[in-house]
Image (tube, rainbow, N blue to C red):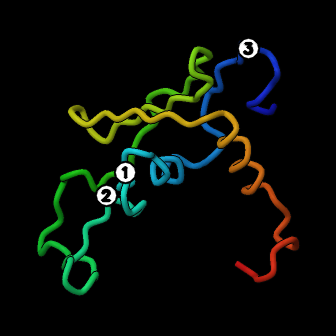
Amino acid sequence: HRLSSSSSSRPEAPCPPLPIQFLEAHDDHKLDPSTHQRNDVPFDPIDGKPPPPPSAPSEDGKSESKLVSWNYSPDVDKWCLTTKRNESDSHSCNYSNNWIDSQAERWRADSDEFDCAW
């Protein structure tokens, strides 16, 4: 079923219609308001390259996010995604219903409609 509808009450969806990684990458809190660049991606300010990988594997947030909840808030007409990487790291972000619908449509689009192959 579609997430959008004309009624003010929407059913709770069991999971987002888009991958969690995609939604997290488009979280407004991860974008610098002046440059519109992602602020959660580390880089060397001199050459723009990513920092060298650590010599030993670490447990500091490299695990995938786990979905905690995906709920619609009619008072703000937004979907709220809450994820957790570990016991102390929980995060929530909101997405407008129109944005979710438009992105879901793009994900479902026919690849023949694009100029180049992916």
Residue at (56% x, 23% y) in the render = 71
Residue 67 is situated, as x and y percent measured from the top left of the image, at: 46, 35
**Residue at the front extreme?**
34
Instruction: Please name the amino acid that badge 2 sits on.
Output: Asp
> Can you identify the residue that label 2 sits on?
40
Mark 1 to mark 2: distance in Å?
6 Å
> Can you identify the residue that label 3 sits on?
8
Q: Quadrant of residue 97?
A: top right
Residue 35 is situated, as x and y percent measured from the top left of the image, at: 38, 63
Instruction: Please name the amino acid that badge 3 sits on.
Output: Ser
Secondary structure of residue under mark 2: loop
> Can you identify the residue that label 1 sits on?
30
* Mark 1 or mark 2: whose residue is earlier in sequence: 1
Mark 2 to mark 3: distance in Å?
34 Å
The foreground one among 21 and 94 is 94
Residue 8 is situated, as x and y percent measured from the top left of the image, at: 73, 14
